[in-house]
Amino acid sequence: MFKPLDPLLHSELRLAVMSLLLNVEQADFSYLKEQTGATAGNLSVQIDKLSQAGYIEVEKRFEGKRPQTLCRITQQGVKAFEDYVDTLKTYLQLGQ
């Protein structure tokens, strides 16, 4: 019997955001939007879900007069991502 995949990370956009955040110290909303091709509204909702789960931290601030949203992956998020990948690997071994 296989361990179930984390439904929070099994979403394409949330998985993409987490993958991007694994490779940088932090990323702003514009960068994530550009890299994922998501709409601002959809990305905002998915960031909120990841933040509520404790997988990412979101910092909202101003740079001059412009609002800026910065995202960073948490240790809990790194662990959840690693567990997701490990679980996925067990599924992939089925065909071997």
Image (tube, rainbow, N blue to C red):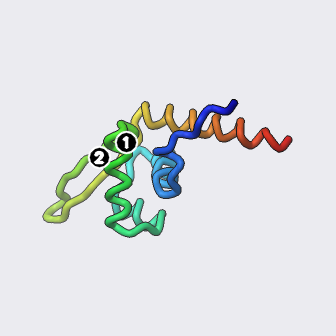
- Residue at image location 52% in from the left, 40% down from the top: 6
- Residue at image location 65% in from the left, 41% down from the top: 88
Q: Which mark is residue 3?
A: none
Along the line of sight, the residue nearer the viewer: 61 or 87: 87
Structural distance between the alpha carbons of marks 1 and 2: 7 Å
Q: Residues within 10 Å of mark 1 (few under 14, many from 20)?
A: many
Q: Dividing the picture into quarters, in which one does residue 33 lie?
A: bottom left
Which residue is label 1 attached to?
Answer: 56
Residue 11: x percent and y percent? 50, 53
- Residue at image location 46% in from the left, 45% down from the top: 8
Instruction: Indicate the quadrant containing the N terminus: top left, top right, bottom left or bottom right.
Output: top right
Residue 12: x percent and y percent? 52, 56
Q: In the picture shown, does residue 69 fall above or below 54?
A: below
Q: Amino acid at mark 2?
A: Val
Along the line of sight, the residue nearer the viewer: 4 or 96: 4
Instruction: Give the structural element (helix, strand or loop) at label 1.
Output: strand
Q: Dividing the picture into quarters, in which one does residue 56 lie?
A: top left
Q: Residues within 10 Å of mark 2 (few under 14, many from 20)?
A: many
Q: Residue furthest front?
A: 1
Which residue is label 2 attached to?
Answer: 58
Left/right of residue 89 with respect to residue 29 in the rendered view: right
Instruction: Give the structural element (helix, strand or loop) at label 2.
Output: strand
Residue 3: x percent and y percent? 62, 32
Q: Amino acid at mark 1?
A: Ile
Contact check, label 1 and label 2, Cβ < 8 Å: yes
Q: Is residue 23 visible?
A: no
Instruction: Indicate the quadrant containing the C terminus: top left, top right, bottom left or bottom right.
Output: top right
Q: Is residue 32 visible?
A: yes
Q: Residue furthest left?
A: 65
